[in-house]
Image: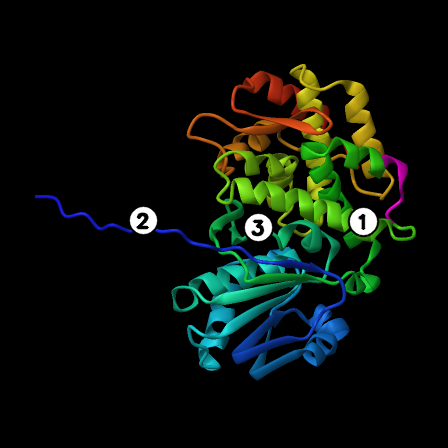
Amino acid sequence: MTININLKRVVDDSYPIHIGPLPEITYEGKVAVLTNPKVAGLHLQTLLSRLKAKEVYIITIPDGEQYKNWESIEFVLERMFDHRLNRHSLLIAFGGGVIGDMGGFSASLYNRGIDFLQIPTTLLSQVDASVGGKTGINNRFGKNLIGAFHQPRAVYIDPAFLATLPSREFGAGVAEIVKMAVTFNAPFFEWLEQNDLREGDNLAYAIQKAVETKAGVVEKDEKEHGLRAALNYGHTFGHVIENETRYSTYLHGESVAIGMVMANDLACETGLMSREEAARIKAVLARYDLPLSYPIGDVERFYQAFFLDKKSADSTVTFILPKSIGSVEITDTVDANTVKKTLSKFAGRAS
């Protein structure tokens, strides 16, 4: 005897991404704002002046990727219970990518899921992390290996928050912008070659183009079954670097920048990409003082860490390699010796 549970349904998780001055946000129920002390000190009053809600509670966690773990999630959830939030409450993730990832993950868990908003305050989170519903935390095996897809109800991107951004954080965000262009938008990359994002209205335009590019990919592949995996260009290498350095040496975007250089070298080794195009990408990244090399201490250990990547299978490693600027290939057929040849070029080399 077979009893079927019919759960076929159409779910509309569409949401707007507002780019511009932060508008007034009104909510009838309780609201919890998740942030960190640095962002709170700089921008919390701006948010609170625009937020109209029945009750507002502030939850702060330490700043840094090293705090993106279970302990922090438990702390956030306990504060939400302390404030007696319910299924009709709202969580606002107010900060960079770490806050956005943990805010979304906490919202996905609390009462089996409540609504949340993304209000990103770093360039990296505005152009990438806040869009697409990926949430999660790190553990000792790697980055973002625990998490869920939980789409926000809306994203509010106010470039004014970037006025207080340190230069390293700015560069880290630029790395993600370059990633978008290399993977899906050759004309945009050519524009990046010709324009400095620190001048005039160039940054606002770059944010818009990056968000449009990612939104288009997410619409086609929300749960990363194929096309969206291409946005992990640079991340396969970068995540290993972050884990090896315990998230204390490089910002996420800096690790991605190094990872893109490594991925480009591997693409050149396999004949997918020309050395000239790899040099063009490296030149754009170098303009923003991003690190472009990492001293690999143990090539074999670095290689084995690839197998913990979410895209990889039991016995194969999946790489995102550019075929040319504006086009990438997702492949699991690169042989180990070729990969290790690329890794060996970075063995013991400093930035």
Q: Is residue 31 left or right of residue 210?
A: left
Front residue of 139 and 161: 161
Q: Is residue 117 above or below residue 138?
A: below
Can you name the residue that lies furthest to the top here? 271
Q: Is residue 195 magenta?
A: yes
Kind of residue indicated by mark 2: Lys
Q: Is residue 240 above or below residue 103?
A: above
Q: CA distance from mark 3 to mark 2?
A: 23 Å
Kind of residue indicated by mark 1: Tyr
Q: CA distance from mark 3 to mark 1?
A: 20 Å
Q: Earlier in the sequence, mark 3 or mark 2?
A: 2
Can you name the residue that lies furthest to the left here? 1
**What residue is pinned by disc 3?**
132
The quadrant holding residue 281 is top right
What is the secondary structure assignment of the residue under circle 1?
A: helix
Task: State the residue at coordinates (61%, 52%).
Answer: 131
Task: From the image, state whether disc 3 or disc 1 is nearer to you.
Answer: 1
Residue stretch rendered in magenta on the structure: 193-197
Kind of residue indicated by mark 3: Gly
**What residue is pinned by disc 1?**
205
Front residue of 46 and 255: 46
Rendering coords of residue 251 (x, y %): 71, 50
Magenta region, mostly helix, strand or loop? loop
Front residue of 269 and 4: 4
**What residue is pinned by disc 2?**
8
Task: State the residue at coordinates (68%, 17%).
Answer: 269
